[in-house]
Amino acid sequence: MKRHGRRFSAVALLVAAMLVLAACGAGGKVGAGGAGPEGAPVAGGTLKVLEFSEPRTLDPAALQNTGQGTALLGNALYGTLMIDNQQTGEVEYRMATDFSSTDGGKTFTLELKDGLKFSDGSTLDAAAVKFNWDRLKDPTLGSDSQPVAGLVKSSTVVDPTTLTVTLGQPSPYFAQQMLGSAMNWIASPAALQKGTNAFDQNPIGAGPFTLQSWTRSGSIQLVKNPGYWDAPRPYLDNITITTSADAQQRVNALTTGQVDLGTEVDWQAAAKDKAAGLQIVTRPFGGGQFLALNTLRAPFDDVRARQALSYAIDLDALNAAVYSGYGEVANQLFPAGSKFHNDVALHTYDKAKAQQLFDQLAAEGKPVSFTFTAFPKDRAVAEAVQAQLSAFQNVKVQVKSADTAESGKIFGAHDFDVLVATAFFIDPEPALYSAFSSQSPRNATGINDPRLDQALLAGRTGTSTDQRKAAYQTVSERLAATVPVIFYARPAQAAVASSKVGGVSMYGTGSVLPELLWLAK
């Protein structure tokens, strides 16, 4: 294996990605697009894949298990302990055979398959899992998966294939949280202990592929792992991964056949892909993209200012301006097909009520004036909101551009009035708790509402669908009443593939499974 050394600064994810910690999917107006090949999988061939960003390292702790991150690469090198079913969201086991709790989610027992081997022939056992999971908890490592790994208070190796896990607080649906993070990827402890440079030269996992070469700012070449546990998978001989964060470049690469498969989060780009006859594989999301209103400082520390802004924004017009009408407006917290669906409207467009509140605040000496912090991808949203608000009196908005690289600092310091963030999911845990609990460090808006907190905790710890549905009904009601955010669109999380690619399937946050992919001859 060889690696070329040109230096690259990885494209950072938007602040939206900070809130996306749960199992996710997609939906919208774009539709399914073209069809893939029929018949049994065919062995052989090289698949050309386009991902959003190049990793800064191949350490699984640094990879993002999301469709807009480096999920396919992580799955290829390290495999998966478990996944969630693309249709039902239920947990299905891969290298693990069980991960269950008998005490309401306080403790879990992980069981592994016998005979699992890393690509260098060493054993993947419970001790290796513990090493990886303990390591992810270290905040100095800077892993996006640290908040999920940090839920684990302690773990104990019982035998080579058994690990018991104790959580800091009960979380019956911890499996769904774990599988959508880097906890699902286990690397060789011995290889990790050699340091980043050595590991990037020769990452050792138990996935369906191994690293052949990595040209920084160029491509990552993967080759079939002959010792993969799930023979005859993988079907492909090789995968070549290149990256682009530009939506039009991704469309061009896919529609002209430069690449065979990519992921997409842009509604207009997905529509162009569909029009070209490409396959569009999605999942039914709850939640979505929202305007985060900073409740910790003026003007949005006053709920009336938040209500006024919500009343003032026409979401259909915003969809037309930003997505040419192709987006799906998030009218409720859960989509119609979700087992948690309720009819609580998160947003009501009412110009008269908006103006009344703007005038009321101005009369009290508190006219609404704020800055919309816009990262590059959010500029169109910010300008569309600014244009709509120009029709009102006693409200002023300034759009301020910010570099994506500054998103972590801005987010962590709550140094904004309004910005775009995201919380989307199939199972709402832990995305909603992470985004809106006053106890969560990922609470962008700073909202602190005891009834909302209580409902979020009930949704996290409830052991039946009925209990959780009732809890999330209250969550919907409190979000509608307190308006810490304005949901405006479901995310367009999709896998896009040419008609010759078979086996396109995803789990979690749009995470494509490379061992299932194959190419028609």
Image (cartoon, rainbow, N blue to C red):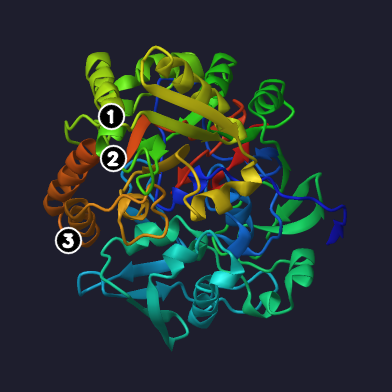
Name the front one of labels 1 and 2: 1
Q: Find residue 428 and report its horizontal and vertical position in percent.
A: 30, 48
**Residue 224, picture quadrant:** bottom right
Q: Nearer the viewer, residue 482 or 359?
A: 359
**Is 207 rendered above or below residue 220?**
below
Q: SS class of the residue under badge 1? A: helix
Q: Which quadrant of the figure contains the N terminus? A: bottom right
Q: CA distance from mark 2 to mark 3?
A: 36 Å
> Disc 3 marks which residue?
463
> Could you say which disc has been placed on residue 216 in the image?
none
Separation of residues labelled 1 and 2 (CA atoms): 9 Å
Q: Nearer the viewer, mark 2 or mark 3?
A: 2
Residue 108: x and y in percent read 32, 74
Q: CA distance from mark 1 to mark 3?
A: 44 Å
Q: Residue at x 53, y 26 (%)?
A: 279
**Disc 1, disc 2: CB below 8 Å?**
yes
Q: Indicate left or right for 144 with 304 as reference.
A: right
For this rendering, which residue is in front, 353 or 368? 368
Q: Quadrant of residue 499?
A: top right
User: Residue flagged by tag 1: what amino acid is it?
Assistant: Leu
Q: Position of residue 454 (x, y in %)?
A: 18, 57
- Numbered circle sitting on residue 302: 2
